[in-house]
Image (spheres, grey):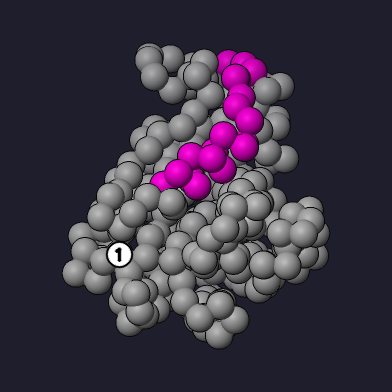
Amino acid sequence: MASNDKVAIVTGAGSGIGKAVALAFLDNGYRVALAGRRKDALEATIKEAGANGSAAIAVPTDVSDAKAVANLFATTRKKFGRLDVLFNNAGVNAPGVPLEELTVEQWKNVVDINLTGMFLCIQEAFRIMKDQDPRGGRIINNGSISAHAPRPNSAPYTATKHAVTGLTKCASLDGRKYDIACGQIDIGNAMTELAARMAKGVPQADGSIKPEAMMDVKEVASATLYMANLPLDTNVQFMTIMATKMPFVGRG
């Protein structure tokens, strides 16, 4: 474990990309508050960190709930004294059904978690980072390849991820005066429990079902850690990390 005095919050830390990033931060010497809806999953991530888990706390959080988000950030500051990095990762999808068959409730659930939840976390991070000493910090938003291009039947998810790009730009601009750097990592086809099905076959724009190339989720964690470890006078505004052979660049 590397020596490090930095404190991070990782949302959606109970599985997938959030879990991989939380473990990478802990291995790099960060003190980490793991947030997610399932306490058992958060505790399992901490257990997987081994000895590094002593520098972690689990804070069950629904990011769409403003009071829960406020509690997450207050608990982190009380435990660790400050906040250096927020990895805004929590997100959900809606069922992959035709756009006209989506319910308003399904739409709102994705917007509440993917967009409003990210805003609430940024807001709380600003409140801590601008007043701490030394001042400032870094926010990294998980935008996804869907911030650039949709998959079939993905209107709620794609709409929120496009909106995340605008939110990232606003937070980057508004954070300057507080020494807060904000960037976005757009991730394509990382091998997680949720994305494993892509290797077996997923719908394509032409209506066919085809398997897609995947990458190790540890590479996403390494890229996020690189962004997190930059000095605050340097920022990766946008990074795209993807499986090299996935169908993103080109016409399909």
Residue 110 at x, y percent in the picture: 52, 56
Residue at 33% across, 54% down: 231
Q: Is residue 38 visible?
A: no
Viewport quadrant of the C terminus: top left
As drawn, the residue found furthest toward the front would be: 3
Label 1 belongs to which residue?
180
Q: Is residue 233 above or below residue 54?
A: above
Tell me which residue sits at (25%, 55%) in the image.
233
Question: 78 or 4, which lies in front?
Answer: 4
Kind of residue at disc 1: Ile
Q: Quadrant of residue 52?
A: bottom right
SS of the residue at dot 1? strand
Q: Around disc 1, counting alpha carbons within 10 Å, would you say few (fewer than 14), some (14 to 19), or many (20 or more)?
A: many
Please, is residue 90 above or below residue 215 in the view?
below
Can residue 228 be seen here?
A: yes
- Is residue 106 depicted above or below 243 in this figure? below
Q: Which residue is pictured at 32% across the width and 69% down the height?
A: 136
167 inside magenta stretch: no
| Horizontal side of residue 107 vs 47, given as left or right | left
Task: Residue 165 in the image: state x and y as whole percent.
Answer: 32, 49
Within the image, what quadrant is residue 38 found in? bottom right
Residue 62 rendering spot, x and y as whole percentages: 60, 70
Task: Report the span colored magenta.
Answer: 207-227
| Residue at image coords 48%, 58% | 88
* Whole-percent x, y for residue 244 in the image: 50, 19
Residue 225 among magenta residues: yes
